[in-house]
């Protein structure tokens, strides 16, 4: 009798494995949804769309972009955390929802490490400090001097938590009095910026570069430790005398917690291939995005490390959790 029970259990276990393997082999058999935590037209959205098209071709199924902007990416992250871990709901995650939001908010409806499956890191966004042409400054030193002589008279707009933290940390370090205006993304902020409703903005080049080229905006600093090929005449942080950033403005692909390893590995392999395509790398670079695939394990480590880095920066900026 004991032998019969053992054989029966083995048979059931083998059947379960067979059914699971067949399910994984059929993946995907319908459209995938890629959730983006910013409005259409923003840097994260453009990067997601560059990834979605070749991913759709290789998987043989549509990859539908779902834009869920606002609340520092929390709404988008929560929708993915609550989704079934079947590989059909994915998150084009950025540092905002998983690195900055935990320190900017007292409570979150998800755990940034336990409620997601790391699939692959995708790269890093580039940021610049931009000014409206009405601001009488052509470099950082002139800008800081002007703000000191006109305290509280300049406004800065932000479309993401990175812009808020970077601007506030800089202002705190230099004892600058600025007024903050928040937006759900860089795209909604752009009309007000061009109209002069606010004078300063830390932003990606995706939505600002054309206006710099037309003389409608000024780029003062590349917020990194080297000059950008997009705006090679703009000095970097070191040249401008700014403190180097410890935070990483990363982006990557996540799924809900419990995503099966075969599906995770399939998606990682596909993303690695996409990010290594020279033609796509050129397109990414045009958006100010430095593409670089990292493994699930490497990506998990980055997420864990950046939780501390962003918390330190947010504390240094004097920002209190809301």
Image (cartoon, rainbow, N blue to C red):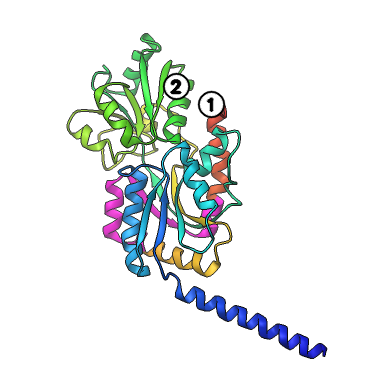
Q: Nearer the viewer, residue 99 or 6?
A: 6
Q: Quadrant of the N terminus?
A: bottom right
Q: Residues within 10 Å of mark 2 (few under 14, many from 20)?
A: some
Residues tagged 1 and 2 counted as in contact (Cβ below 8 A): no
User: How many numbered discs sit on the rendered protein?
Assistant: 2
Identify whether 81 is placed above or below 155: below
Picture coordinates of residue 12 (x, y %)? 67, 82
Q: What's the CA distance linking mark 1 and mark 2?
A: 12 Å
Question: Can you identify the residue that label 2 sits on?
Answer: 171
Identify whether 158 is placed above or below 122: above
Picture coordinates of residue 72 (x, y %)? 47, 37
Where are the magenta residues, as a range? 274-301
The dominant secondary structure in magenta is helix
Outermost top residue: 149
Q: Nearer the viewer, residue 196 or 69?
A: 69
Q: Nearer the viewer, residue 220 or 166?
A: 166
Q: Nearer the viewer, residue 253 or 213?
A: 253
- Residue at the spot 28% in from the left edge and 33% down from the top edge: 234
Question: Can you identify the residue that label 1 sits on?
Answer: 319
Picture coordinates of residue 125 (x, y %)? 38, 43
């Amino acid at each position: 009798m004991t032998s019969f029970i053992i054989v029966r259990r083995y048979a059931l276990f083998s059947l379960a494995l067979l059914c699971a393997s067949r399910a994984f082999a059929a993946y995907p058999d319908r459209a995938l949804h890629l959730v983006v935590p910013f409005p259409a037209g923003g840097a994260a959205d453009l990067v997601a769309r560059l990834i979605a098209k070749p991913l759709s071709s290789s998987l043989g199924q549509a990859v539908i972009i779902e834009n869920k902007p606002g609340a520092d990416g929390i709404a988008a992250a929560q929708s993915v955390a609550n989704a079934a871990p079947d590989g059909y709901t994915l998150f084009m995650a950025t540092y905002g929802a998983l690195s900055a939001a935990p320190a900017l908010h007292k409570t979150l409806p998800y755990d940034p490490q336990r409620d997601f499956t790391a699939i692959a890191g995708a790269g890093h966004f580039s940021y610049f400090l931009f000014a409206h042409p009405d601001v009488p400054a052509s470099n950082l030193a002139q800008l800081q001097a002007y703000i000191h002589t006109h305290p509280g008279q300049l406004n800065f707009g932000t479309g993401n938590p990175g812009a808020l933290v970077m601007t506030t940390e800089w202002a705190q370090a230099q004892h600058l009095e600025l007024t903050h205006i928040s937006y759900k993304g860089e795209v909604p902020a752009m009309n007000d910026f061009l109209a002069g409703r606010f004078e300063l903005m830390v932003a990606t080049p995706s939505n600002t570069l054309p206006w710099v080229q037309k003389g409608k905006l000024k780029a003062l600093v590349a917020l990194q430790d080297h000059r950008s090929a997009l705006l090679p005449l703009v000095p970097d942080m070191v040249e401008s005398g700014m403190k180097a950033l410890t935070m990483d403005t990363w982006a990557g692909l996540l799924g809900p917690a419990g995503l099966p390893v075969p599906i995770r590995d399939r998606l990682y392999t596909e993303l690695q291939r996409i990010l290594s395509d020279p033609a796509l790398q050129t397109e990414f670079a045009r958006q100010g995005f430095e593409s670089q695939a990292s493994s699930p394990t490497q990506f998990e480590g980055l997420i864990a490390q950046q939780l501390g880095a962003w918390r330190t920066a947010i504390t240094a900026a004097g920002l209190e959790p809301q």
